[in-house]
Amino acid sequence: MAVIAALNEFSLCVLLLLGVSLLKIITTRFIAHEPLNAFRFYCARLADKVNKPQNSARQQTIAGLVGIFVTLLPIVTILWLFEAFIEVVWVWQALLLYIALGAIGLDRDSKSIAVALSSNQKYAAKQQLNPWVLRETDQLSSLGISKACIEAQLLRSIQQGFTVACYFIVAGPLAAITYRLLLEMHYSWNIKQPNFKNFGQYIHQIVSILQWLPTRLFTIILLFSALGQNLLLYFRLIKPHFFALNNNIAIYTLALIIEVRIGGVAMYQGVKLRKKSFNDHARQPEPKDIIHARTRIRYVMYFSTTCLILLALALNIITFNQMN
């Protein structure tokens, strides 16, 4: 009976994931909103209070660790205790998942950015891109906007969509919302920004560990979209990045598949950061490559969703046979 109950719970998780994702897609089309904006504001104000530039590097690093616990533990504890007072549990689970899921509007915005660049409307493209990236967009050329948009599509889809879904399916809504809160802290205290180089070290490591497996799973599915291309060559090229504690493997894979160069220099808080570039021998991206990247990312989402549905159906069939 315990196995049967687990199977039914998995099917419910899949159904909730599909329903909440569809609901968020629909609502985002009519109302631009982000449920975690207040949490981002809190993270920014907390950093202003405790991340003092006059402190030593070690003090800033410890302050960042304390900030994680002070911020996360009360929220997660309250959410965990509050569930006991909910009569219809699946509604509570759906609400937590709705808050945790993100990057829904980026799919639409990326298309608008590509259209704006094709029409030589760089200012409009920068305005639409700015909320999705940490880097400064004011001085970006059309080439820089294309690169940043492709990278943002990929990383935001992995971080706010695919990884959230993975934790929801495997460990439940509390795990999904906990991961998303940690991710928001990572965005707010990102070590690419000079003033968070030390303060954000611990949250950077925690989020990198949490994303490691989902990112590799996403990359493997992304590779399947390259069937008919140089699949074996792509695999050999990305293999050295497999065990690295970052998202470079996914960026490199997408660059190879859409046959463009991604990465390079980016500006953060007025400081130029030389990031790693990928697929250096390929051509520079164009606005049309934003759409190509969007198509490949959609493929991963559709493929993984189909696999979840088929698995849930198979488990339900097994359950039905066991009951009869």
Image (cartoon, rainbow, N blue to C red):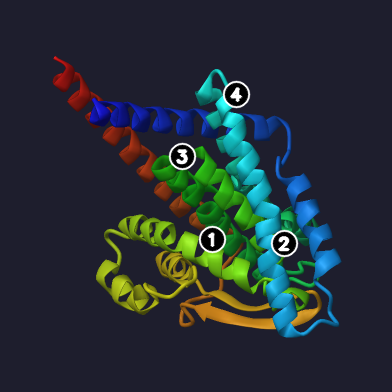
Q: Quadrant of residue 102?
A: top right
Q: Amino acid at mark 2?
A: Ser
Q: Earlier in the sequence, mark 1 or mark 2?
A: 2
User: In x, y percent, where is residue 55?
Assistant: 81, 81
Task: Give the residue pinned by disc 2.
Answer: 188
In the rendered image, the residue lying farthest to the top is 324
Q: Nearer the viewer, mark 1 or mark 4?
A: 4
User: In x, y percent, where is residue 90?
Assistant: 50, 25
Task: Give the residue pinned by disc 1.
Answer: 289
- Quarter of the figure with the C terminus: top left
Q: Earlier in the sequence, mark 4 or mark 2?
A: 4
Marks 2/3: CA–CA distance: 25 Å
Residue drawn at point x = 81 percent, y = 68 percent:
50
Does the residue at mark 3 contact the one at mark 1 (Cβ under 8 Å)? no
Residue closest to the eye, 157 or 196: 196
Task: Give the residue pinned by disc 3.
Answer: 172
Marks 1/2: CA–CA distance: 29 Å
Residue closest to the eye, 155 or 15: 15
Left or right of 79 on screen, residue 2: left
Does the residue at mark 2 contact the one at mark 3 (Cβ under 8 Å)? no
Q: Nearer the viewer, mark 4 or mark 2?
A: 4
Residue drawn at point x = 80 percent, y = 52 percent:
41
Task: Give the residue pinned by disc 4.
Answer: 85
